[in-house]
Each structure stands twice: as structure tokens, then as C-alpha cells.
Image (spheres, rainbow, N blue to C red):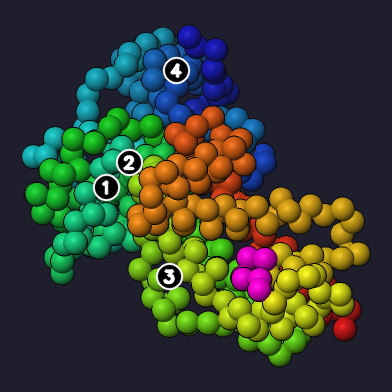
């Protein structure tokens, strides 16, 4: 049980090593440390403390373990008591005691007070005089579905895993999604929301898994680091990078329906849970931005500029075929044996999915599209929707990376 041991020569040694705040960066490999609750034996000179459970900081990359600020404090107190009572060995069993902070005291929320004292930076809080504000409270992902669908709430993800919920003009609070796919709110923030909203969340409240430091939520809220926009919108921004390169090099503007496109992007709500139903808004948004939001006539002109011998029938091509023709022409000779067909695959998939969601289609036609998607992407079944969605988003991202690269290549040549 106690194969983990921290050894200190004497109390001075302990004090000099532990009289400081822990940081969340690993001193060995510079990666992030998360809280890990573990059994450990602490020895200071000739006194042994055996803890059945103590919060440590564990590097998520190299596994290096260090004492958390909370455990340093607990050890310090324990050691002093041993001296006073003349004990040489103590065993501290699992502590069932759950400290409750002043926030949401009557609401019986599940959280671990040790997170507040152990996760770096949370208890160093100069804004809130009452202890415990920045205690993470964890929920299953379904907790926020109601907020996404009820028009009284405004639900927004700034990035893949960091966002905020707003209720009318009454309150706005941030939340994050941690590495274990759980929703995290601050306890103090939850004390400001109305009881009805809190009662929507409560059935989904789960035990803490202590994982927070790696999240964009922690980075933004504690370290003030801006998070990247979500991957879906990132693809749209990449489209603009490509357009700009084309404009600079060829004086061709591919822009089309600009204000409608911007509106689509502004109102876009990233799906929190991936199901056939929840990804429909993403499919619609990306289809409008990437396939409809391009000036087809100008794209054809671009194709004619970059392709010395245009293919038969190009006059009738629509945006997807033209994207493909342009990419093929631009990449000719620069990267050998580039598989243009598979790079283009995600754009065809987007088109298929958009058709699939066209509710005016006959069910026979829809089923045949579905069969085709399952076959092309080698899915187990249409239930394997998460994998399909990942392939789509990653693939579109990659496609626009290639288009930007190709347009960049060419501007260097000229
Ligand atoms: Zn490390």
C-alpha cells in the first residue's frame, strides 16, 4: 500500500523544501501536473506518517509525483502533533469528512474540498474573501443539454472545451470540459445562479476526478491564457486564409454571401454530445460556409489560371469539383504522389451528410446515402457517429491546410 515514500532528513529539510507554493508545471519535463489522490508514507527524520489518502501532484507526462500545497500543510500539522504527543509512527486512515464551503451550502452539491486547496492557484484567490469560490464542481455532459435548447439560456463555447452559459439578463457563468469529458463549474459561480437552473444541473453532479489543470477552462480562468477557437470555426477561418492568399496572388476574390456566412458562424453552437441529431447544425454551417460561400464563377476563373490543360466538362463543375481541380493543379510537381482523392474525401462527405439531412428527400434516397457513407468511411455502422464526425472535422481541417500550402507554394514561385 505504501510503496510511495517521501523522505526528509529532518524538519528543516522538510520546511525548506515545502515552504513554497507548488506550481502546475513539472520541474522535470515542463508538462502539466494534475492532482492524484494516493496512499503515501512520509518520513521526517525518525517519525513516520502513513497516509491512506493524500492529494499529490502528478505529472501527466512523466508521472513525477510531488506534494501538493494541501498535503504539505497536513504533514506539517501532523508532524507537530507527533512531537507534542511523543508519537513516532501514525497511521492516517481515509478521511470520510467532507468539508463544506459557504457557497451553495444548502444545496448538497458533490465536490472535493481538497481540490480547492490542492489544485495549484485555486486557493490563492484575492477576489473572493470567503474561502472555496474556485472549487471545481463536476457534472456529466448531459447537464448542459437543457441550456443548449431552452431559448431563455444563451449557451456558448468559445473553444472546444471552454464556454459560458447565460440566463436572460440575470447571470452569466463560465464552464469547462475537462480531460475526462466532464463539465466543470466553479462552486462560487453556482451560488449565484437561480435555484431552478441549479436544479437542472444537480441530477448530473458527479464525484470529482480532480482533473482540471490541463483544461482550457483552467488556462483561461486561472492563467489568463486565451483558448483557441473551436475546431469547427477554425476550419472556417482557414477558408478565409486561403481566400486571402488567392486574392493577393491572383487578384481573384472568392468571397460570396459574406454577411449570411458571418451570421451562420456567429450563431453556430458546437455540439457537446455527438449524435446523428446534434451534429446537424455543424453540417449545415460548414456546408454553407465552405461549399455555398464561395463564388463559383471566380473559382472557375482561378482553375483556368492555374491549370494549363483544363479537364473536359469543367464548365459545368460546381464548387467541390473546382476545389479539387485547383488543388490538383497547384500541387502538381510540388509533393509527389499526393493522394488528392482522399484529401478531398471530407468535402464530399460534407456534401453527402448535408443531403442526408435534407428532410425533403425520400427515406429510400436517404438510406442509400447513409449506406454509401458507412461504406466509404469504413464505419461499423451509422452508430459510429463520433468516428465519422472526427474524420470529417480533422479531414476538412487538413484539406484547407493543403489549399493554403498550395496557394502559398505558388505565390513563392511567381
Ligand atoms: Zn513531467
Count neighbours of disc 1 (C-alpha within 10 A) and say few if under 14, some if 14 to 19, many if 20 or more: some
Q: Quadrant of residue 241?
A: bottom right
CA separation in Å, label 1 and label 3: 20 Å
**Residue 378 in magenta stretch:** no
* Image mark for residue 141: 2
The image position of residue 200, as x and y in percent, is 16, 44
Residue drawn at point x = 67 percent, y = 66 percent: 321
What is the chief secondary structure element of the magenta stretch? helix
**Residue 318 in magenta stretch:** yes
Count neighbours of disc 3 (C-alpha within 10 A) and say few if under 14, some if 14 to 19, many if 20 or more: some
* Image mark for residue 39: 4
CA separation in Å, label 4 and label 1: 37 Å
Count neighbours of disc 4 (C-alpha within 10 A) and say few if under 14, some if 14 to 19, many if 20 or more: many
Q: Is residue 250 left or right of residue 99?
A: right
Instruction: Assess whether mark 1 and mark 2 are in contact (beta carbons under 8 angstroms).
Output: yes
Please say if 95 is above or below 122. above
Which-is-in-front pick, marks 2 and 4?
A: 2
Which-is-in-front pick, marks 2 and 1?
A: 1
Disc nearer the start of the sequence (4/1): 4
Which-is-in-front pick, marks 4 and 1?
A: 1
Q: Is residue 297 left or right of residue 408?
A: left
Which-is-in-front pick, marks 4 and 3?
A: 3
Residue that carries the numbered disc 3 in the rendered image: 265
Please say if 306 is above or below 161. below
The image position of residue 342, as x and y in percent, is 71, 50
Cβ(mark 3) to ligand 1 < 8 Å?
no
What is the secondary structure assignment of the residue under circle 4? strand
Any part of residue 356 in sight: yes
Residue that carries the numbered disc 1 in the rendered image: 145
CA separation in Å, label 4 and label 3: 49 Å
Amino acid at each position: 500500500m505504501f510503496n510511495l515514500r517521501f523522505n526528509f532528513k529532518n524538519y528543516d529539510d522538510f520546511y525548506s523544501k515545502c515552504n513554497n507554493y507548488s506550481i502546475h508545471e513539472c520541474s522535470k519535463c515542463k508538462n502539466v501536473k494534475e492532482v492524484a489522490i494516493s496512499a503515501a508514507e512520509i518520513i521526517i527524520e525518525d517519525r513516520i506518517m502513513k497516509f491512506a489518502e493524500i492529494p499529490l501532484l502528478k505529472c501527466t507526462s512523466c508521472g513525477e509525483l510531488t506534494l501538493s500545497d494541501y498535503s504539505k500543510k497536513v504533514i506539517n500539522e501532523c508532524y507537530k502533533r507527533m512531537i507534542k504527543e511523543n508519537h513516532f509512527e501514525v497511521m492516517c486512515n481515509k478521511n470520510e469528512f467532507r468539508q463544506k464551503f459557504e457557497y451553495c451550502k444548502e444545496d448538497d452539491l458533490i465536490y472535493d474540498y481538497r481540490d480547492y486547496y490542492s489544485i495549484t492557484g485555486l486557493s490563492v484567490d484575492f477576489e473572493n474573501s470567503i474561502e472555496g469560490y474556485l472549487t471545481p464542481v463536476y457534472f456529466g455532459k448531459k447537464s448542459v443539454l437543457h441550456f443548449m435548447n431552452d431559448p431563455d439560456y444563451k449557451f456558448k463555447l468559445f473553444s472546444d472545451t471552454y464556454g459560458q452559459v447565460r440566463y436572460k439578463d440575470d447571470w452569466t457563468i463560465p464552464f469547462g470540459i475537462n480531460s475526462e469529458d466532464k463539465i466543470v463549474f466553479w462552486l462560487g459561480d453556482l451560488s449565484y445562479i437561480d435555484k431552478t437552473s441549479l436544479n437542472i444541473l444537480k441530477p448530473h453532479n458527479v464525484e470529482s476526478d480532480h482533473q482540471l489543470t490541463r483544461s482550457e477552462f483552467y488556462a483561461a480562468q486561472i492563467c489568463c491564457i486565451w483558448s483557441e477557437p473551436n475546431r469547427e470555426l477554425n476550419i472556417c477561418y482557414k477558408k478565409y486564409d486561403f481566400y486571402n492568399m488567392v486574392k493577393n496572388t491572383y487578384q481573384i476574390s472568392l468571397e460570396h454571401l459574406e454577411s449570411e456566412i458571418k451570421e451562420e458562424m456567429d450563431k453556430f453552437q458546437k455540439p457537446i454530445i455527438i449524435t446523428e441529431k446534434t451534429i446537424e447544425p455543424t453540417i449545415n454551417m460548414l456546408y454553407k460556409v465552405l461549399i455555398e460561400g464561395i463564388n463559383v464563377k471566380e473559382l472557375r476563373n482561378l482553375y483556368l489560371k492555374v491549370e494549363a490543360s483544363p479537364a473536359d466538362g469543367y464548365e459545368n463543375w460546381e464548387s467541390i469539383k473546382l476545389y479539387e481541380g485547383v488543388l490538383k493543379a497547384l500541387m502538381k510537381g510540388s509533393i509527389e504522389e499526393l493522394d488528392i482523392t482522399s484529401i478531398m474525401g471530407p468535402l464530399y462527405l460534407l456534401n453527402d451528410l448535408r443531403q442526408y439531412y435534407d428532410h425533403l428527400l425520400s427515406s429510400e434516397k436517404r438510406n442509400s446515402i447513409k449506406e454509401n457513407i458507412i461504406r466509404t468511411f469504413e464505419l461499423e455502422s451509422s452508430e459510429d457517429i463520433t468516428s465519422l464526425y472526427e474524420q470529417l472535422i480533422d479531414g476538412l481541417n487538413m484539406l484547407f491546410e493543403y489549399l493554403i500550402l498550395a496557394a502559398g507554394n505558388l505565390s513563392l514561385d511567381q
